[in-house]
Amino acid sequence: MGETSIERGRSARARLLAAARELIGELGWNAVSTRTLAERAGVRSGLVHYHFDSLQALLRHAALAEVQRMLDGTSALLAEATSPSDGVERMLFDLDQYNGADPASLLFVETYLAATRDHELRRGMSALVADFRCALTEALTRSGHPRPQAAASMVMALFDGFVLHKGLDQGLSAEHIAPLLRRITDTEEVRNTNTEEDGEQR
Amino acid sequence: MGETSIERGRSARARLLAAARELIGELGWNAVSTRTLAERAGVRSGLVHYHFDSLQALLRHAALAEVQRMLDGTSALLAEATSPSDGVERMLFDLDQYNGADPASLLFVETYLAATRDHELRRGMSALVADFRCALTEALTRSGHPRPQAAASMVMALFDGFVLHKGLDQGLSAEHIAPLLRRITDTEEVRNTNTEEDGEQR
DNA sequence: ATAGTATTTGGTCAAACGTCCAAGGCGATC
DNA sequence: GATCGCCTTGGACGTTTGACCAAATACTAT
């Protein structure tokens, strides 16, 4: 049972971050308090300000780490796939494990909203999202997609909106929209009904 | 200046709702208090519980009314258009007036999140969203779209995700993704790379 | 054993919170 | 002018909040 002080400290800190990860989704970013956080983590509330500068700093740290973990997992699906179209479809089906009302889904959206009001959180989220979009754009470019950047932006927006809507619309499932999702990621351009303004690039 | 008590009452109530509409987006649903609300509306905080049963009831009422107003306006664009593809594209460009960080955009997302934790709000939002999706699905059906319901769900999820992402990704604009949006709403089915499971219907 | 360092506790503090209510204001009606 | 009903005020209430800190504890190094 030889547990050093530093080890116990790391464990308590990790439990606080895990509690934050859960509670942000369960209660909402602004409804997480130092006391509920400490109770969930199994420590006393005074510890929060020993391990973190402020409650906001704790939430920021926990949210960014979790978002990065989720994006990394999703990125891996893309890298393993034989084509971006297949990868994006696998990402979509992977998203189906979230029902739009679970803490994991809600943490994502809560973090987006909190980022609009917390400058440092915004910087962190921007960087994570930009990295992911960059990877997706590159994969689409390699496959010969005519508008890789626009397609990447669309897929990412669609995924987040997909999660957001699943909370209200029970009929929303991955297999429901997968065929149409392929229309976005498909390499071949569909016939253009209006060729009025097509001079855009990158 | 013959202003009856009832008229003054209606005015105060309306100002409270307008203040809620603004503050939900500015501060976040859970950060709106009776006192900031009253100050913004130019009344005393005691008045909140005269016109509304609770703070939550006020926020619920304000949010649902605003979401309905926005959806009605967007619905009109669809009805005026010559085809659903054009209508959806006009809706997209209409969305461009929101930068993703303004109170109007954020109120929408905040209401989604609050609906996952407030049963009555969830019922109201579900009804509004279902109505809108129904109108969009019908329009797509009339135009001969092969998967009208899936396309409607996708467009709606994409729009909300679009607003959500604009807060972080400055490069996201309507004209950027409009060409690819048409791929979803286009009537003609794109060539199907995989015909493995295609037995779904409705 | 002793001194030293890192972690944890338990409590205090002022501020802000939602809700409630007795009292007052004020135009309409008799 | 008195009465009535709706609207509004200002303050009270009991909680909860983020932050902070001196003391207590647990482990390490001497």
Image (spheres, coloured by chain):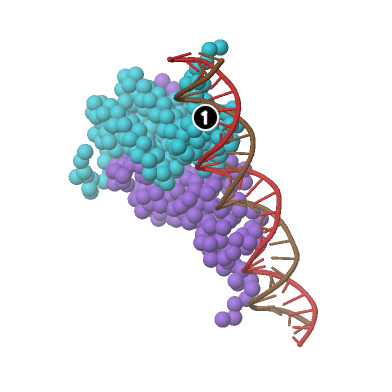
Chain colours: A purple, B cyan, C red, D brown
Would residue A84 be found to the left or right of residue A179 on screen?
right
Whether residue B27 is situated above or below residue B11 in the rendered picture: below
Residue situated furthest top in the rendering: B1
Query: In what element is the residue under mark 1?
Result: helix
Quadrant of the rendering where the N terminus of chain A is positioned: bottom right
Answer whether residue B22 is visible to the viewer in this image.
Answer: no
Where does the image place residue B111, in percent across and percent down from the top left?
45, 38
The structure residue drawn at horizontal position 57% and vertical position 65%, both measured from the top left corner, is A43
Q: Which residue is drawn at 51% across and 61% down?
A: A40
Q: Where is residue A51 in the image (x, y as percent from the top left)?
A: 64, 61
Residue in front for this viewpoint, A53 or B12? B12
Closer to the camera, A181 or A79? A181
The answer to whether residue B5 is seen in the rendering is yes
In this rendered view, identify the residue nearer to me: A149 or B95. Answer: B95
> The residue under label 1 is which amino acid type?
Leu
Residue B170 sits in which quadrant?
top right
> Between residues A92 and A148, which one lies in front from this camera angle?
A92
Q: Is residue D4 above or below residue B127?
A: above
Subunit that carries the residue with mark 1: B
* Residue on which disc 1 sits: B16
* Residue B185: quarter of image: top left
